[in-house]
Image (cartoon, grey):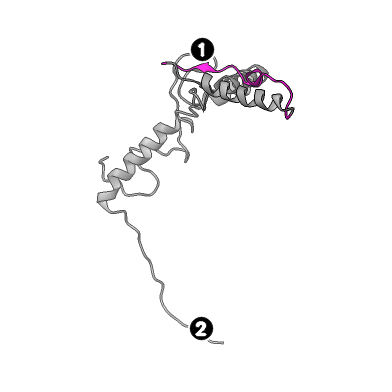
């Protein structure tokens, strides 16, 4: 077996100056948005049936009953109570179920809930005040990373 002899080759990757500023701003914005945390949707997820739809279903059930095809029934009896989401928009949503689950978690695991809540902006678990905080703590995700200083080995042009 024979091997080739040759020198070593070095290469250096440099970030173009036209992308450095936008990249810094993008990372700063990402860290800021990471503080927000989960934002649940509290609006309607499914539209409620209107009275004409319920009447049509009841007519079909009554007709089926008249010919012995189905027992007499109240089709609206099994429908959940629709919620008014404003401006007469009737529908169904799971926000109450979600909020009950969060409240139960906070009640059953108060220390874990408080620790989790400290990672995000919004009402804190302890005093209800708005508390913006970094999700990575004071040192950042890379143990001292500072978006303004860019200490990740990227060249710092001093600008944002």
The percent coordinates of residue 108 (x first, y second) are 68, 19
- Residue drawn 67% across and 18% down? 74
Dot label at residue 127: 1
The magenta stretch is: 69-87
Dot 2 crowding, Cα within 10 Å, few <14, some 14–19, many 20+: few
Quadrant occupied by the C terminus: top left
- Looking at the image, which residue is at 66% across and 18% down? 77
Identify the mark nearer the N-term, 1 or 2.
Answer: 2
- Residue at 33% over, 42% down: 24
Give the residue at mark 2. Answer: 3
Q: Is residue 37 left or right of residue 81?
A: left
Between label 1 and label 2, give the one nearer the viewer.
Answer: 1
Q: Residue furthest front?
A: 67
Above-or-below relation of 141 to 84: below
Q: Left or right: 57 with respect to 90?
A: right
Looking at the rendered structure, the secondary structure element under dot 2 is loop
Q: Is residue 90 above or below residue 38?
A: above
SS at mark 1 in the image? loop
Of residues 144 and 110, the one nearer the viewer is: 110
Q: From the viewer's perspective, tell me whether residue 110 is left or right of residue 131.
A: right
**Pick the front one: 92 or 137:** 92
Q: Overall secondary structure of the magenta stretch?
A: loop
Residue at the far bottom in the pictured view: 1
């Amino acid at each position: 077996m024979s091997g080739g002899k040759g020198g070593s080759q070095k290469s250096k990757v440099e970030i173009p100056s036209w992308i450095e500023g936008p990249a810094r701003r993008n990372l700063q914005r990402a860290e800021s948005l990471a503080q927000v945390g989960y934002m649940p949707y509290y609006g309607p997820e499914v539209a409620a049936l209107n009275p004409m739809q319920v009447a049509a279903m009841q007519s079909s059930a009554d007709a089926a009953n008249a010919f012995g095809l189905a027992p007499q029934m109240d089709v609206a009896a099994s429908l959940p109570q629709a919620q008014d989401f404003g401006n007469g928009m009737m529908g169904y949503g799971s926000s109450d179920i979600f909020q009950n689950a969060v409240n139960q978690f906070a009640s059953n695991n108060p220390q874990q809930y408080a620790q989790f809540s400290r990672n995000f902006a919004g009402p804190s678990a302890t005093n209800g005040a708005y508390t913006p905080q970094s999700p990575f703590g004071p040192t950042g995700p890379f143990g001292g990373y500072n978006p303004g200083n860019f200490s990740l080995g990227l060249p710092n042009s001093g600008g944002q």
